Image (tube, helix red, strand yellow):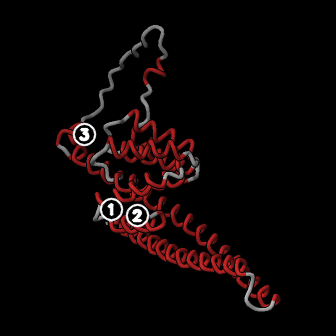
Amino acid sequence: MFQGKTSLGFVAGLFSLFLMGCASTMDMEDLQARVDANTAQIKQLKHQGGSGTVSQDSVRLADIENRLDQQKARLANLRGRLDVIDHRLDTLMEKIDEQNARIKSMSQAAPLSSSPNSMAKTTTPPITTAIAPVAPPQGTSGSAASVPPPSADILYRQAMNDYQTGHYQLSKKEFGQVVSLYPQSHLASSAEFWVGQSEFNMKHYDKAVSSFLQVIKNYPDSPKRAVAYFKLGRSYESLGKKKDAIHSYRRVLELFPLERQLDELAKRRLSRLE
């Protein structure tokens, strides 16, 4: 029950952030239109050389340039707000992803703990007969040979914690270990996605593109494919590859029509590029 309420809280938070992002994007588009109009008006005034007295033209030009500076400052502020909202959206998505993985892991473990055989094992008294320790093979270290790597869940949680605290180089390495050590795990596709996110946040956009493409190509059933296409578009935008970015956003709309919030974000990115 608590987990259900928590999931609903995450979804509500995600939706509210999405609405904030949409509002900020609309404000940005409106401001950009005003900036463009004022810039065009300044160019026209300078080109015409003025139709009235010199003082009147100078005052009018100074007034427009002052408004333009204010609008550019507001535009920069809105872009900063959008970056913050994007980061908070990423963080909420991480928490939802982590909770879903935990719930799935618990549901898989529950039948084992409640089976008759496991019950019998827990009630059987321990054997107290002393057993001589087995010597490790020659040429190997006993401690090194007996220590297995951390589980996929432990590695994933540690990587997510490092990601959320801004240690992207470390989180990239740990998410990569989940993929390489546990390629069949239900966490593998999500870990590959967060490798890309870590690279994106470090501005390694070429490497981010590679990771998002891996999610798309290697995990056809991954719940991360839709957002991987979107973040692929963002990475291409950052690289200045406009055509590739447009193609990625269009794939979001074509392949994932039910992802309404993501579709809306993709449409808004497309409106800037087309």
Q: Which of the numbered marks, if any, corresponds to residue 253?
A: 1
Residue 151, position as x, y percentages in the image: 40, 38
- Amino acid type shown at disc 1: Leu
Q: CA distance from mark 2 to mark 3?
A: 57 Å
Q: CA distance from mark 1 to mark 3?
A: 56 Å
Q: Which of the numbered marks, if any, corresponds to residue 123?
A: 3
The mark nearer the N terminus, 2 or 1, is 1
Front of the two marks 2 and 3? 2
Task: For mark 1, give the secondary structure.
Answer: helix
The residue lying at 60 percent from left, 75 percent from top is 36
Q: Nearer the viewer, residue 101 or 226?
A: 226
Q: Quadrant of the N terminus?
A: bottom left
The residue lying at 56 percent from left, 64 percent from top is 83
- Amino acid type shown at disc 3: Thr
From this viewpoint, is residue 48 visible? yes
- Amino acid type shown at disc 2: Ala
Q: Nearer the viewer, residue 46 or 122?
A: 46
Front of the two marks 1 and 3? 1
Q: Pointer 1: residues within 10 angstroms few (<14), some, or many (20+)?
A: many
Where 15 falls versus 237 (above or below)? below
In this figure, which residue is indicated by the disc labeled 2? 266
Q: Quadrant of the C terminus?
A: bottom left
Where 43 falls versus 120 (above or below)? below
Residue 47, position as x, y percentages in the image: 70, 77
